[in-house]
Image: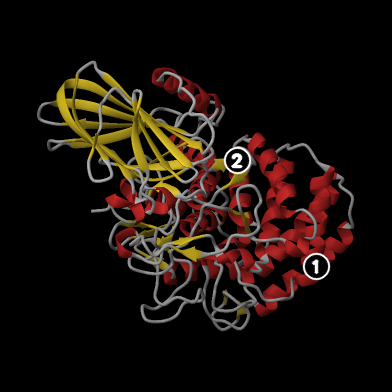
Amino acid sequence: MTPRISDHALIGDTHTAALVALDGSITWLCLPRFDSPACFASLLGGEDNGHWSITPTEEYVVSRRYRRGTLVLETEFRTATGAVRLIDFMPHRHATPTVVRFVEGIDGEVPLHLSLCIRFDYGRSVPWVRERDGGLEAVAGPHTITVRSPVAMAGDNHRRTAEFVVAAGERIPFVLSWTERGRPVPEPEPADALLAETIDEWRGWSDRLPADGPWAEIVARSLITLKALTYEPSGALVAAPTTSLPERLGGARNWDYRFTWLRDASFTLDAFTANGCLAEAVAWRDWLLRAVAGDPAQLQIVYGLDGERWLPELTIPWLAGYRRSTPVRIGNGAADQFQLDVYGEVLAAMHSAREAGMAPDDDAWALQQSLVEYVAQHWREPDEGIWEVRGGRRHFVHSKVMAWVAFDRAARAVTDHGLPGDAVRYRALADEVHDEVCRLGYDGDRGTFVQAYGSTALDASLLLMPAVGFLPATDPHVVRTVDAIAEDLSRGGLVQRYLVPDDEVSPDGFVGPEGSFLLCSFWLVDALAMRGDRDRAVALFERVVATANDVGLLAEEYDPVEGEMLGNFPQAFSHVGLVNSARLLGRGPLPTTA
């Protein structure tokens, strides 16, 4: 049976990442990049679609942890005859992407079974496998994977297996490397040296993170996870390292998240800059300049890791999907959508980075001015909105609020930071948007803001109104909106994006509901804290944090009834929400509501 989403931990090298299950199985790995075809894809199919497991042959009790400040994973198996530790990591990239696995004896002796099934092209292509000195080599098309180990592996039905025993004090390495066709396979460094180097690299970064506050440990883990989701060569930030993990078991909301959404990246940038990670902010700003380039009318809401614009959405029919949730998709058709809110999010992130001390850049400000001018021309148009609906464009209130943010931050850049521009005009545009939202985006009968002009529905994105400064958290209209969302959109104590009955078509064009969206729950935490309802905010924060798995990782969504993680994993948005809410709550008591 496919391990649950929550059973997985993440390892990575800031170029790509792998998921390791509790049973010692790598179920997902794309090489050489996050968005490359997977060579281990059992997560979305079965074992024959690629996996690499190292598991005791006897019954065992398992526990695991990350080494402090790193992405080095340690899984401990205890059996009736002894205990072993499985150490998994990906060294920081030098020549080729590499996965290292150690089996380390702790007590007694433990018999283990290894199963290695390499399948290129998302679990479809069976490679030609041949023995090489100290291991084996698997070749298919442009891909070559080499696995080196002192353990001999036998061929078995297009896979390799081994039975071996590890005693206390023994340490057996396995090193997997990928190379492109025509390039020589380099000799790897000794596995022990790679481990020491990887620990030093991660701690050299994580030791600079803030270490105070009541939730310092889980905040640090979230920031390490966000760092792992950066694509170091370009500065891009991926939304998640996976595709097609469902937002509802058996449903069709299965999307490819291995790309850079301007919205997600902007939120991540805020989390980084607020915690002193300015190098990541500068790298993303430089990526943005290259990706957007030219005409702001051609701005996309999502790009490839190097700024690629063409991300055709396809389905993979040979994968059965996570727990039979189909289709399995690669690429993302949302690249063609118009989402007005992303302009405000980019401007807000750049403003936060300036406030945090990021050095100004003339080209970056010129780009931001171009984006503001585009918003000035198009803010009155309907769009697909923050949730990327596929049921038609509407005048979403959150989108208009973020248009206000774009103008507001542009005006403040001029007045507060001395950048060139017409602050009076930017402020006038902000006031115009503000007035329209308060008139057309508000339901006077109910006394709340609504999802879209003319609608009576609520939307969790409205919780951001006080966070972005559109209205104070203590404004009566905001208070009623927040209370209504907390009552109507809560399920099992967590917040849904919007309310959809079981048999109805939602705004995203699909039938039926989904899990609770963890970022929205953190937004409610922030809204409650900002109005002074600290006790309630802390209780909700701890409820959301409790959905993390045993190593502190969060998925996109959570089913509070079934207790199941849903959606792609680990999800940058969720970890951003955790970091930002912890920082807000960590400031101490906030003013109470009048």
Kindly identify which numbered label has been placed on residue 584: none
- Above or below 325: residue 108: above
Residue 376, disc: 1
- For the C terminus, give its image quadrant: bottom right
List x then y, in percent, for residue 412: 80, 52
Query: Which label's residue is closer to the chain start, 2 or 1?
Result: 2
Q: Label 2 vs label 1: CA separation?
A: 29 Å
The amino acid pointed to by label 2 is Phe
Residue at disc 2, secondary structure: helix
Q: Nearer the viewer, residue 49 or 62?
A: 49
Identify the residue under disc 2: 272
Q: Is residue 414 visible?
A: yes
| Rendered position, 303 above or below 416 | below
Q: How is the image coloured?
A: secondary structure
Indicate left or right for 397 with 317 as reference.
right
Name the residue at 60% across, 40% down: 272
Residue 34 coordinates in the image, percent (x, y):
51, 46
Give residue 540's position: percent from left, percent from top.
Answer: 42, 54
- Is residue 3 visible in the rendered structure shown here? no
Are the two marked residues, 2 and 1, in contact with CB atoms closer than 8 angstroms? Answer: no
Judge by depth and name the residue closer to the eye, 443 or 328.
328
